[in-house]
Image (tube, rainbow, N blue to C red):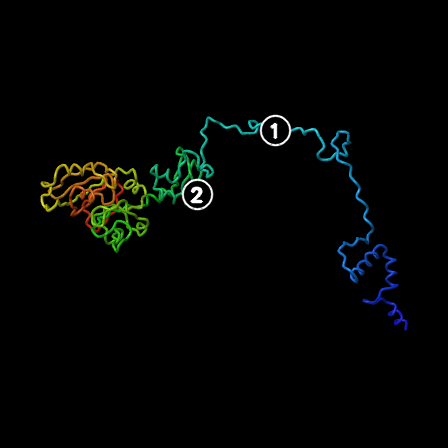
Amino acid sequence: MRREREAADRPRFGSDRGEPQERRSGDRGARSDSTSRRFESERGERSFAKPAKGGYGERTERRERPARGFDDTLPAANRRFGDDRPARAAKPRASASATARPVDTTIDTPHPPRRDREDAPGMLRLSKLMSKLGLCSRREADEWIEKGWVMVDGERVDTLGTKVFPDQRIDIDPAAEAFQSSQVTVIVHKPVGLVSGQAEDGYQPAITLVTPENRWEGDRSGVPFSASHLRQLAPAGRLDIDSTGLLVLTQDGRIAKQLIGGHSDVDKEYLVRVAYGDHTVDVESHFPAEKLALLRHGLSLDDVALKPAQVSWQNGEQLRFVLREGKKRQIRRMCELVGLEVVGLKRVRIGQVMLGALPPGQWRYLSEDESF
């Protein structure tokens, strides 16, 4: 019975809150006001006014701050940022001359090959300078730099594209010199029907002749054949597919530059069999002298004047040409300009190296005592 009586006295949700509500309102004080307003708004018209905050007492009014003053009468403790203050004395700085290390101007300061100075006036790419000095080709220079075989003013350089000053000292590692001395140069007697460089239009390149079986038995170089000699073996100059004679294949960039570089002055000698109109025999007696003079000097190819050439009759049907340049099909085009037809063309000499008795389709090594 006691439990039933206590249960009857408990307030229930949804029931009309009477006396118990009044007791709670008396205990909570100011909160009862907001509570009654909330329930009234639920029963009647909705109000959009914000309810008054309560529960923790009324908030006191904010005290008005006195206006900030900028007069000097305020005590130091009450001053704030923005008050007039005397400027802080600047700390004395040490002069640049006092802190900088003295430089001995009597000694030439080296120019290290630094990348941040690569745009300085007068600087060159290291590989270009090495090629210009005749140390190696630019391709070889790049390989040596990548391998760390090049030093500039005693500092090892292994970054491609590094620029240096022309007056800097360049040293080559002995490993590079040993590698360079192991490179070979091959003399080939190219027959008609082979191309000088890469295979094209079904024609094989001349390098296919460089085999132990095709080596000339008269080779006196003493260099033993090795398959490594075929790596990076490239032609130093062209010889047309319809031409025959001396062709140079080399691994040595210095020789390649000497023979085909932009400033090469190595002369090349050719024997050229010609016909003039219907004359295939005793062409010399029918060919005008003034046209022979034009072959020596006065012709242009591709609107560029040709360098003077040595041209003379070897026999009645054959001319001897000595050129110091090598434009594509130059001799054939020169002959066409004066009415001559080239029947056969053979290169017999490059610089001081002669084709000699080397048979067609065979090859030999360039000896140590030979040079172009």
Disc 1 element: loop
Residue 370 visible to the viewer: no
Left or right side of 189 for 121: right
Residue 79 visible to the viewer: yes
In front here: 264 or 151? 264
Residue at far front of view: 45
Say which residue label 2 marks: 159
Classed neighbour count for the residue bearing mark 2: other residues with Cα under 10 Å, few (<14), some (14–19), many (≥20): some
- Residue 270: image quadrant is top left
Name the residue located 86 percent from the left edge and 55 percent from the top edge: 29
What amino acid does circle 1 point to? Answer: Arg
Disc 2 element: loop
Instruction: Work out which quarter of the rendered image holds the C terminus and state it.
Output: top left
In front here: 347 or 292? 292
Left or right side of 59 for 84: left
Say which residue label 1 marks: 93
Of circles 2 and 1, the one toward us is 1
Name the residue located 28 percent from the left edge and 45 percent from the top edge: 236
Classed neighbour count for the residue bearing mark 1: other residues with Cα under 10 Å, few (<14), some (14–19), many (≥20): few
In front here: 296 or 140? 296
2 or 1: tag closer to the N-terminus:
1
State the image coordinates of residue 323 (x, y, percent, origin top left): 22, 39
State the mark number for residue 133: none
State the image coordinates of residue 139 (x, y, percent, origin top left): 36, 44
What amino acid does circle 2 point to? Answer: Thr
